[in-house]
Every structure is written in C-alpha cells, then in structure tokens.
Amino acid sequence: MPACSSNPAWLGAAAALLLAAAPGLASPQTCRPCHAAITAAYEKTGMGRSIQQRPLTPPATFYHRLSNRHYTVDGSRLRRHQLDPAGRPIQVVEKSIDLAIGSGNHAVTFLHRSPAGPLLELPLSWYTSRNGYAMSPGFDRPDHPDMRREVSPTCLFCHAAYPDSPSAAPRSIDCARCHGDAQAHLRQPERGTILNPARLTPARQLDLCLQCHLQTASSGIPDSLLQPGRGVFSYRPGEPLAAYKMLFDRADPPAPRFEVNHAGYRLLQSACFQKSSGALTCTTCHDPHSAQTRPACANCHQTEHARQPAAHCAGCHMPKRRPADAIHVTVTDHRIQRQPRFTNPSAEDHTPYRGKVIPFYTPADDLSLAIANVGPLTPAVPELYRQHLQRDPTDVATLAALGNALFRLGRRQEALPVLEKALALDPHHAGALNTLSVAKASSGDYPGALALLDRARRAHPDNALVWFNLGVTHAARGDRTAAAAALREAIRLQPDLSEARARLAALAP
C-alpha cells in the first residue's frame, strides 16, 4: 500500500514538520490576535459556521406521507408519532435538539446527543429555500432511519473541526483543517512554521479541498476506503489524498448524476479542469477565507464574449441545480459546460445500483477494489476480509463484517473469536454486539446473549435491531412478558419493522 505520509519529502521541510503531530490549537480564536480580518471573514463562511451549538428551531408541524409519520417541533424538542384508527397518537418518540450541522446558507440538519453518548441525526431539517422544514437528505423515503441514525466519525470529518477528544462536542471547521498544527507557529510566529497551502503544488492544493469536497456517490457503494492503518481524522494538510484514502465510483457513465457533494466530482469531469494540466484548482475561483469568488474565466477564455464587463460566466455555464439526494436545496454544478442541459428532480432518487465499482481519482490495490465490490454474501467474502486484516489487524469494522459473514455462512465457531476481538477493541460496536448475541443465542447460551444485548441496549438505546434481538432471545427462553416489551420498543423505534410485529403477534395467547 502507498506510504507517502511516512516520507514527506514532497512537502518541504517546514510542511513536513506539520505532519508529525496531530493538528491542534489552529482555530479562529487562536489566530485572531494576528489575523483579525481573515478570521472575521472566515467565521462568516459556511465552513466557519458548519456546526451550530444552539440552533434556532421555529415551532411547526410536519407530516411525512411516505412513512405516515407526524413530526412536531416545539422549542428545542422534536416529537414523532403515528395515529391509530381512532386518531390517537401511537409510537411516540421525542428527542431534544442539541446542536445542528449546517450554516443555514442552504439547510440546517438537527442532531440529538443521546445520554449514552452517540449523536443521532434527526429526520427533520430546516431549508432556507422553503423557509420551513422537510425531511433531512436521504430520509424522504418510506423506510428512512427516522430518529435512529447515528452520526459517524466519517460524517463529522467533513462537517466539523478535528475533535479535542472522542467525547467532545463537535465544533465548526477551523483553521487546522487547511493549515495544520499551529503550535510551532505560536511559539515562533514567522513564515515557515505553519503550513501555507498557497505554497503547495497545485495537486496538493486540490487534494486539500478534495479531502471533503469529493464524493462520488452518497449511497449505494462504498465511495471510499481508508488506507490500512489510517484513522478517520488522520489526514494532514499537505499530504497526498491517496496516502489517506482510496476513492471509488460507479462504473456507469457519471455525467447524468448530480448530488449535493459533487462539487469536486463534477469539476474533475470538466474540460476546463482536464485541459488545465492541473493548474485549475478550487482556489482558482474561490477564496477559502471569505467564500468570495474570483473572476477567473477570462484568464483562459479571451473571446469578446468572455471579456464583457458584465459577464457572469457561472450563471450560464455552472448553473444552480437540485441534487438527486437533497432536493430541497440548489447548489452550483461545478461541471463547467458550454450549454448545460438538465431537469431538476422532484423526488429523491433511491434507485439501487447493482453494477461494478471502479477506482476514481486515487489508485486502489486489487484487494481494496475487491472489497469495495462485495455484494451478496458468498463463501469467498470472508477470505477478502481476512486478507485485509493481515495488513490492518485492528480494523474493527472489518472484524465485525468478517464475524457477521462467517456466522451467516454457518461457520459459527470461526465467527465467535473474530467478534470477541472486535469487541475487545471497541466494546460498544453495535454490529459486533448484535451478531455475537445472536450467535450465542443460536447455541442456547441465552444468558451470554442477554448480557451482550444489555450492553448494546445501554450503548445504543435507539437501535431497533438490539430491541428486536432482545425480544427474540427472551421468547426463545420462554419469557413472553419480557419478549413482548422488547418487541414493542423495537416497533416504537422503527414502526415499519414488520418482523417485530409478526413475532409480537405470535406471542399473543
């Protein structure tokens, strides 16, 4: 696997120093005494306001027809319910709105911090274009995750600053994301003691932006995999993006697809970028400190049309469009075209993709590409995971996936030690807890299964599958009362969990 980060000669001595330590102390508050004008401008940008600690929540009600669920925003709380045949509220879930992702330039998505710790993305977002609420991106479907979707570190990597600690509340993206560690600069405030992205090569400047602004697909495929041994927040400004992760794309033609995080993806498809020999980067047009745009088109296009004083090139050649995965916002299409033609979608597109996955922008080794292409479970899948674990033995997600695959293939005895290792590394991993509990229950070890599910329930109280497995396990050991209570909780959390309804009905005398 590439190991460029261990040989940072490509950065120069000053920048190489910054890769040795985790980013720290580079925030607008730290930088303001010397860079007042820059920090004041940056704090008004979307990135500088990416997290809201006390979001405004105008009171309102909203009915989602596709899932038949009613939502009420009241103060800093969101309530969900359905109605029984008599019109009475049932399946009531209520969560506090503790913070939000999004500056409000386009939207604000609300988050809840559960008492157990995980952040949950709430199903309702505020959209500036509507001046009101609608379903959060990806939730406008009958089987949406409702109030159960845990916010992963991968999500926060691009929506928040580097965390001060694993339990710290997210903060808005700060100076460290582009300038790296500021400690040396604070001790010796002069040129060369902090990374200046403008002094990077154009390729590294582009990578700096594409660490977050390049997503090939928001669903349906694994759009990226971290390089073995890399953590989510391990990217360092100035290193090649390929040293941090491998990117993948669908194998079908990319041109018709347009999603909310397609700025970099669409720019890379542009003839302007492809013919620039790498000179065209995001900051050719964007000032990252102010979010202002620069009139850069005339640098290359010398026609009379392009030189007109009132020319607004982007308005015609980079129109604002509605993404297929976030239909309540309009964002700029960065695929620069002479005559763009498109139709805005009227509903989110959740059409499943069944084709191959291919590398995109960064190279990928054969094993990672094979893992990215894993589809329906086959006997060959566990060997792929085992090969990956030889190079990254503490990858908890892969350990959990291997244990799950082995158990589903009927190889229970092989699955047990794998799942136990995953839980030794991450005692709260929901997937490993669920799979190991089912594996134990399947062999009659009900006390062991219930102990694991109790751990899972306390760590992930909104995970409907945990409550479902609790119900099934209690029923198997003959405790119908406890089984019914757990299945009812699973249904309250996930009203469309039909298997839970069927098993609850089977418990009736």
Image (cartoon, rainbow, N blue to C red):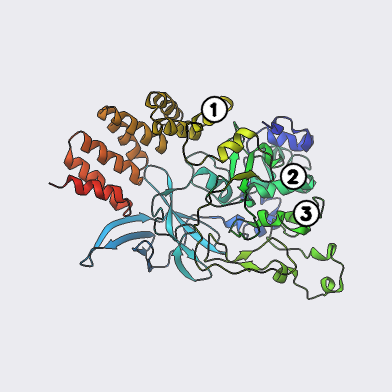
Circle 2: residue type: Arg
Q: In this view, does 371 lie to the left or right of 433?
A: right
Can residue 488 be seen at all in this image of the molecule?
no
Circle 3: residue type: Gln
Q: In this view, does 341 lie to the left or right of 157?
A: right
Q: Which residue lies furthest to the left in this view?
A: 509
Compared with residue 438, is residue 158 higher up or lower down, i.e. above or below?
Answer: below
Compared with residue 424, is residue 464 higher up or lower down, i.e. above or below?
Answer: below
Q: Which of 498 and 252 is in front in this view?
A: 252
Q: Name the residue under label 1.
A: 389
| Helix, strand or loop under label 3 | helix
| Helix, strand or loop under label 2 | helix
Q: Is residue 297 left or right of residue 345?
A: right
Can residue 430 be seen at all in this image of the molecule?
yes
Q: Which mark is residue 166?
A: none
Q: Mark 2 points at which residue?
A: 204
Q: Mark 3 points at which residue?
A: 274
Q: Which residue is drawn at 53% across and 39% down?
A: 374
Q: Indicate which label's residue lies in the foreground, 2 or 1.
A: 1
Circle 1: residue type: Leu
Q: Using the numbered discs, state the Cα–Cα distance from disc 1 to disc 3 in whole angstroms.
A: 37 Å
Q: Mark 3 Cα within 10 Å, few/some/many (few <14, many 20+)?
A: few
Q: Position of residue 265 (x, y in %)?
A: 66, 54
Q: Which residue is drawn at 58% across and 43% down?
A: 162
